[in-house]
Every structure is written in C-alpha cells, then in structure tokens.
C-alpha cells in the first residue's frame, strides 16, 4: 500500500473537498445569493428547475438554490457554535474533574453520566420544548446535549496524563494546580478532542436538521435544510426537487464529515478506530 | 562437544530502505554452552538472536547469511517444521515479565500449552510435569499456583514461571532477551542462577542478550560484542572483559561504575534536611465497614542530609526507597514523624514556607521518556522553573537557560522537541531543569537505570561535576550498587520500609554488617565476579 498523501488518504481528501466546497458556499451565501431567499413570488409557485431557477422554486415561489445556500449558512453556523459550546464547556469540565478527582469528580461525573444516558436528540428535544424554538435555543439545547461525551473523552485523557511524570515535575517546580492543568495537561489532551469535534459537527448538523424538520428548530420563514425538507413534504409527489435539494445537501455534508472524521481519527487517535 | 547453532555472515536489512541493521555477524554455540550477546540499544543484538527463530518484525528482512541449527538450515524449513522447532528445540524468555504471560489464562494453562503442542502426553502427565517444573523454579505451593493468574505474582516470580514453561519442554537452546533488566538486583540474581542451573541440568545451551557486562562476567563462557549491527569482538568472557582488544569494548568495560575517591567535605554543623522517625502508611482498601489495614511503606526512618553531600538510598523493589524520597519532597503525605529543612519543620509549614521549600528542592525522575512535556521545546522546559523567580529579569533568565544547557552538554538544543532526543539527552534535559534554579537539594530517583551503560556513565559523571560546581545536596535512590559506589558519600540500606544499615560509602561497601546488605552486595554483578555458577 502506498502511503496516503497529506497523511489523510483518499477518503480524507474527498471529505476535505466536500466540506470545503460546502463551507465556501455557506460563506458566500452570508453575503450574496442569486435571489433573496425570503422574497415571495406567487406567479412563480412550484416551478421545476430552469435556467433562471437552477433548482426550481417552492410553494411560495422562492428560489430553492438561494434558500439551500442560505440554509447552508444557517446550518453551518449553528453547528459550529454548538460544537464550540460543547467543546469549551466539556473540555473545561473534563480537565477539572480529571485533574481534581475526589468529590468534585464524583458529583460532576454523576450528573454527566445521567445526561449521557439520554439519547442526545431526545435530550435536545426536551430542552427545546423548555427553551422555545429559536436559533439560540437550538444552539444551547444541542450544546448541552453533546457536552457530556466531550467531558468523558477529555476526563479519560486527563486521567492518564496526570499520572505522567512531567505533571509531577511541574508540581515540583512550584507551579499551581491550575497552571499545570492548562499549561501541561490541556495541550496534550487536545488531539482526541479535535477528532471528536469533527464528528460532532456532523451529528449536530443532522440533529439541527431533524429538530427543524419537526418544527422545533429555527422557525420559518428563515431557511434551514431541515425546515425546507419539512415544507417540501406535502408537495413531494408533484415537485420532487423540493425534497431532493435539501436532502442531497444534508447527505453530502454528512458524507464529507464522516470521511474526514474517520481519516482524522485514524491519523491522530488509533485507539478510537473501533468506536 | 558438537556445534548446536552456527550463524554465518548473517545480514538483516530494514525492508524499505535496504539499510543494514545487522551486518555480517557470525557466531556459533556448542551444546550446553553459555554465550552472551552484548551491546547497547540499537546494536542489533536482539534482532540477531530473533533471526535464529525467524521471529523478526515484518519490516526486517534477512538479506544474507545462513543459520544452521543442529546441522539443519533454518531458511529451508517448512512452516510446520519451524513451529516444531520454536518452543520444542529453541525456547525463548523475554525481557518484560509483566507482559510476556497472558493475563487472561491461568499459569497451568500457559505451561500446559507448550507441553500439549510438542509432547505426546496425557493431561495427568502434563499436570505432574508442570508441578515438578514449578517446584524446580522454587515456586511455593506449585499445585495451587497452576490455578492462579499472572497478576498474583511479582515480576521475579513471573520470570521464574516463564522460565519453567520454557524449560519444561527441555529445549536444546534457550534464548534469553534481557531477562532480568526489569528486575532488581537480588531478584535478578535469583532468576539467572536458576536459569543457569536448569540449563546445566538439561544440557541446554544458552544465548543471553544483555547490556550488562557484570552478568557476562558472572555467567557467560564466551561473549560477542555488537555495535550498530557489526561484530566488534568475540572471545571468551574473561578475555573480553579483562583484555579487550577493541577500543569500543574497552569503552564498555570502562563504563562500569568504579568507586571514586573518598571526598572529605567540610560539613556544616547543621544538616540541610533532617528526617526523624518518618512513617508512611498507604491506606488499605475500603470495605463495607472501615478499611483493611494499610501498607506501611516507610517505617520509622531517620536520616540527615548535609549541604553538598550525596546520600544514596539502596534496596530492592518494595523497600520503600522511592516513597521515602517523595515524602521528603512532600509529594507523598507522611503519616508520622518530622521532616525539617534548615531546622524548620516542613510537614506543618504554611503555604508561603512550603513554596519556598519547593523552590529549593528538585526531583530527577527515572524515566526520561515521560518526565518531559512532549509539546514543549527544550528551552521552554528548562526555563519553566524560572517563572517562580520574579526578581530575575528576562535577559538574565535567557542567559541562565543557555548557560545551564551548555553545562549539561546540550548547548543549541533549545528549539528541539523531546521526541527528537535520545534517552540520555532527555535525561540531561531533566537534570538541566532540576538545577536551573540552583536548588540546594535534589532527589534523584533511579536517574540512570533506564539508560545504556556508556550513557549511564556519562550521566553519572555529569551529575558529579554539577554537584561539585553547584554544591547541592543529593538523595540518590537506586537499586544499582555500582552507580551508588561511584557517586555516594554515604549509603543508607533499606529493607521493608526500615533502615537496616547506614554509614559512609567505604564502610558499607567494605564492611557490610547487616545480612541484607551483604546479600545485595553479593548479588551485584561486577567484573571480578568468579563464575561460581560453573564452579
């Protein structure tokens, strides 16, 4: 077998290209889309794909391409913020519980394990009901739902790192616990976190789409791939493109994330290959 | 005597690059003979021995040479025949007793495995032979031991069990790859004495792979010195050790620790560190009501350490010497007694006093691979202790770091990362980190036992030079009496958490009083050791 180029292999490269393209589209859509994704045009209802509207129009005559692009931007931003939330909170908690051990660890991990026992999407659903369907609600709900797995991963890494002699050496130097935690333990615990974050980006994107599809995510008329799918449901028989476009977008993103995530995992963390 | 193993012009290369790792090595082994393969890490000694059993890592390819076992060419062997030879004709004992037995199977199953494969005997006979073999390696209560699992035994016992399971098949050749490197001196002697005895009883030839010349002196009849895959010298053990012809062999022999001159340093009246009646008890396991009785690791230890002197603490594994060192630095809580630094009690010290004590003390660890943060550059690692000296300005700090790196012979290494350095270089970094703040007291916990002989010598010499220059006191913890003899001013011998003997180095080494000290000294491999195993 030849050595994979760039250390990620063919699959990883496909993943990078897919995600990269979608990311560029999402960034472009934040400033420019072919049509205003919100402007109605009742004369142009449910038109099939044409030169003017590449992906056709929906039941209110809105351009599907523009809505899909705007949806990409919304979905990517929400996923990114959610992952950022889960990683920040989860890493901090993980380092603290893993390093301090004792009662802090026991109490925090008890709560953490209770949260882990719920399926993530179910937890997010119930949190959404409490917080109400809006963009911040989605980010917070999904963030809280995904934090526990980060805590687990980080705590495990920290537990093995804190027994390393360089941590004891740091104590001998006279460094405080907090300093040792952030200077010596945290940087060495980040590799598995980076791998987890990639996969988590895919999970949150899918979860956000599911929530929107169920009407619990970002409320219409603002487009996301999930609520576009939901809106397409009554018209699927006559206007199949309405469902296909957001569906394929979600599928491609998930494919890209998974290819990239697996490649990163093989590259940085051989222990997790069977997870 | 007839030749059992004949290796001629053996050449091994690293598959992808064709880089030679063993180059033109020839040796032979008669029946019942004891040959030592000597070299430092990277010398190819393990690969050369493994090639005999065709147990090479997949990347290593045999590029030339022949290996004949009892006249039969190994390279022409079918896989079936090879399987008969492995275990049946040639047995192998590995370095790491903690992982060479399968933790999921009982001892009985593992000994029976080989017997079942290679001998046509029934279950009752297997059991009888297994018990006989375990008794032969002095395992108490051998019948019960068959049902026990590896984790119930200490390292030395596991290595004896391993030996029993290999020798039960009465192989014609035993390959022992650093079989005692992971064990302390006393256990090392026990295991090797047994190995030699068994080999003699069964007429087995032995190929011992080692970096320890003391073991060669004590056990081997002939020796072969390897360096970077090439044969340096071959001859009788006595000739190699006492009249080495090659410069490298002489360097190896000279690397053995020798007693330095006895220095009479003028002692300050007041000791730097005073330990009185120190007790350390590890709490027992929690049970439903209360706890099981704890394990007393250090029991009533008192000692003084003066400015500038080196006090060595020696003892076997489990003697409490490491715990003692860490307790003095307050890394392990003491359960009784007092420790004071310059007359001030540090067990009851407040935060500020404790911080001051920390600044004056340092620790050098055994394993240079895990004591450096893999993500920091050498310069950062050495500079880190200086962040607690707020009075020093950045320019002075940078100067101090450069100066200290120069002192340990690593000038210009400040931009490197730990993984780019060899074990000896890493240990130099650890020493630089320890002395950069000019501590008055350094605890060195087995600082050279993970290193090659010539590197050990360099590090010990470096340590002595630094100590002479900076006058720090040192508590030198070691099970290697050779290193202790070279570096220590005073020696403390510990057994089961208690001090059994202490005195000046010359007194302890020349006139040992306690039987444990005598046993330790007798077990220490030295060049002068007569080959009593063959006497």
Image (spheres, coloured by chain):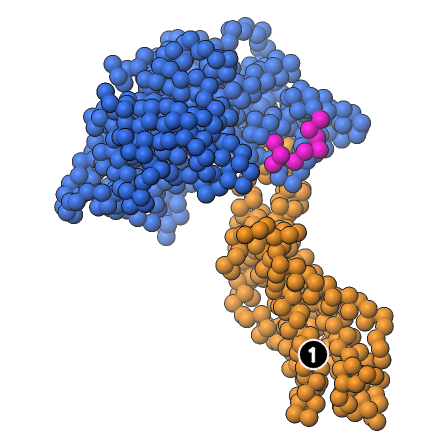
Chain colours: A orange, B blue
Q: Chain of mark 1?
A: A
Q: Nearer the viewer, residue A49 or B382?
A: A49
Q: Residue B534: which quarter of the image?
A: top left
Q: Is residue A261 left or right of residue B195?
A: right
A219 to B385, vertically: above or below: below
The structure residue drawn at horizontal position 38% and vertical position 15%, both measured from the top left corner, is: B235
The structure residue drawn at horizontal position 67% and vertical position 19%, both measured from the top left corner, is: B407
Q: Is residue A119 left or right of residue B74?
A: right
| Residue B418 part of the magenta-drawn span | yes
Q: Nearer the viewer, residue A178 or A25?
A: A25
| Residue B6 part of the magenta-drawn span | no
Number of numbered discs present? Answer: 1
Percent x, y of residue A159: 54, 48
The structure residue drawn at horizontal position 22% and vertical position 36%, both measured from the top left corner, is: B168
Q: Nearer the viewer, residue B306 or B262?
A: B262
Q: What segment carries the magenta color? A: B412-421
Mark 1 crowdedness (10 Å alpha carbons): few <14, some 14-19, many ≥20: many
A274 to B535, vertically: above or below: below
The structure residue drawn at horizontal position 62% and vertical position 28%, both measured from the top left corner, is: B429
Residue, disc 1: A246
Provide the secondary structure element on which disc 1 rests. helix
Helix, strand or loop: magenta stretch: loop
Q: Is residue A203 left or right of residue B187?
A: right
For the C terminus of chain B, which image quadrant? Answer: top left
B22 to A14, vertically: above or below: above
Percent x, y of residue B127: 17, 43
Percent x, y of residue A41: 84, 90
Q: Residue B309: which quarter of the image?
A: top right
B253 to B168, vertically: above or below: above
For the N terminus of chain B, which image quadrant? Answer: top left
Q: Nearer the viewer, residue B292 or B532?
A: B532
Does any portion of residue B339 appear in the rendered image? no
């Amino acid at each position: 077998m030849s050595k994979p180029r760039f250390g990620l292999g063919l699959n990883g490269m496909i993943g990078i290209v897919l995600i990269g393209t979608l990311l560029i589209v999402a960034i472009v859509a934040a400033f420019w889309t072919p049509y205003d994704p919100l402007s109605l045009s009742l004369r142009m209802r449910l038109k099939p794909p044409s030169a003017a509207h590449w992906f056709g129009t929906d039941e209110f005559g809105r351009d599907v391409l523009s809505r899909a692009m705007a949806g990409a931007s919304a979905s990517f931003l929400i996923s990114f913020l959610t992952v950022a939330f889960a990683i920040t909170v989860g890493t901090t908690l993980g380092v603290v519980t893993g390093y301090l051990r004792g009662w802090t660890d026991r109490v925090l991990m008890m709560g953490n394990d209770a949260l882990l026992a719920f399926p993530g999407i179910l937890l997010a659903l119930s949190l959404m009901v409490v917080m109400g369907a809006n963009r911040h609600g989605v980010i917070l709900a999904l963030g809280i739902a995904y934090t526990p797995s980060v805590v687990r991963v980080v705590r495990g890494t920290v537990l093995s790192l804190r027994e390393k002699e360089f941590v004891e050496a740091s104590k001998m130097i006279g460094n405080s616990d907090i300093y040792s935690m952030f200077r010596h333990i945290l940087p060495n615990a980040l590799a598995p976190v980076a791998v987890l974050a990639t996969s988590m980006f895919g999970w949150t994107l899918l979860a956000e789409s599911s929530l929107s599809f169920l009407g619990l995510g970002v409320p219409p008329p603002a487009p996301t791939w999930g609520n576009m799918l939901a809106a397409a449901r009554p018209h699927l028989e006559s206007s199949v493109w309405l469902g296909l476009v957001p569906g394929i977008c979600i599928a491609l993103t998930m494919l890209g994330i998974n290819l990239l995530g697996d490649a990163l995992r093989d590259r940085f963390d051989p222990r997790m290959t069977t997870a | 005597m007839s030749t059992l193993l004949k290796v001629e012009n053996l050449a091994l290369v690293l598959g992808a690059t064709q880089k030679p790792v063993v180059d033109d090595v020839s040796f032979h082994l008669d029946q019942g003979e004891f040959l030592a393969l000597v070299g430092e890490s990277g010398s190819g000694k393990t690969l050369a021995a493994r090639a005999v059993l065709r147990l090479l890592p997949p990347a290593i390819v045999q590029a030339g040479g022949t290996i004949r076992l009892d006249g039969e060419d190994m390279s022409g062997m079918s896989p079936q025949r090879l399987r008969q030879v492995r275990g049946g004709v040639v047995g192998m004992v590995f370095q790491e007793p903690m992982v060479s037995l399968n933790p999921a199977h009982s001892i009985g199953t593992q000994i029976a495995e080989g017997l079942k494969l290679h001998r046509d005997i029934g279950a009752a006979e297997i059991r009888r032979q297994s018990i006989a073999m375990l008794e032969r390696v002095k395992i108490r209560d051998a019948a019960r031991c068959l049902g026990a699992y590896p984790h119930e035994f200490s390292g030395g016992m596991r290595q004896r069990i391993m030996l029993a399971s290999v020798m039960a098949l009465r192989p014609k050749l035993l390959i022992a790859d650093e079989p005692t490197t992971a064990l302390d001196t006393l256990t090392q002697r026990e295991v090797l004495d047994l190995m030699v005895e068994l080999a003699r009883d069964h007429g087995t030839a032995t190929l011992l792979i080692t970096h320890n010349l003391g073991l060669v002196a004590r056990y081997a009849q002939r020796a072969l010195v390897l360096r970077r895959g090439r044969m340096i010298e071959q001859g009788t053990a006595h000739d190699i050790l006492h009249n080495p012809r090659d410069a490298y062999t002489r360097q190896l022999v000279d690397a053995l620790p020798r007693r330095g001159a006895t220095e009479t340093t003028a002692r300050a009246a007041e000791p730097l560190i005073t330990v009185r009646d120190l007790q350390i008890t590890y709490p027992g396991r929690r049970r439903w009501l209360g706890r099981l009785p704890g394990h007393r690791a250090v029991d009533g230890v008192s000692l003084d350490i003066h400015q500038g002197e080196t006090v060595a603490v020696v003892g076997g594994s489990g003697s409490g010497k490491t715990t003692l060192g860490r307790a003095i630095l307050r890394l392990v809580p003491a359960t009784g007694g007092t420790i004071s630094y310059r007359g001030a009690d540090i067990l009851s010290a407040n935060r500020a006093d404790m911080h001051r004590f920390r600044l004056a003390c340092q620790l050098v660890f055994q394993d240079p691979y895990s004591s450096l943060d893999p993500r920091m550059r050498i310069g950062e690692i050495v500079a880190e202790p200086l962040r607690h000296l707020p009075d020093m300005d950045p320019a002075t700090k940078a100067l101090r770091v450069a100066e200290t790196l120069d002192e340990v012979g690593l000038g210009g290494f400040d931009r490197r990362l730990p993984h780019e350095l060899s074990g000896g270089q890493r240990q130099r970094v650890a020493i630089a980190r320890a002395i950069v703040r000019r501590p008055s007291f350094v605890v060195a916990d087995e600082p050279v036992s993970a290193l090659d002989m010539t590197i050990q010598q360099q590090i010990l010499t470096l340590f002595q030079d630094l100590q002479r220059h900076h006058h720090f006191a040192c508590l030198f913890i070691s099970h290697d009496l050779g290193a202790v003899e070279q570096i220590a001013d005073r020696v403390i011998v510990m057994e089961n958490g208690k001090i059994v003997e202490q005195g000046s180095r010359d007194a302890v080494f020349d006139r040992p009083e306690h039987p444990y000290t005598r046993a330790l000294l007798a077990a220490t491999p030295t060049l002068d050791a007569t080959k009593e195993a063959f006497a």
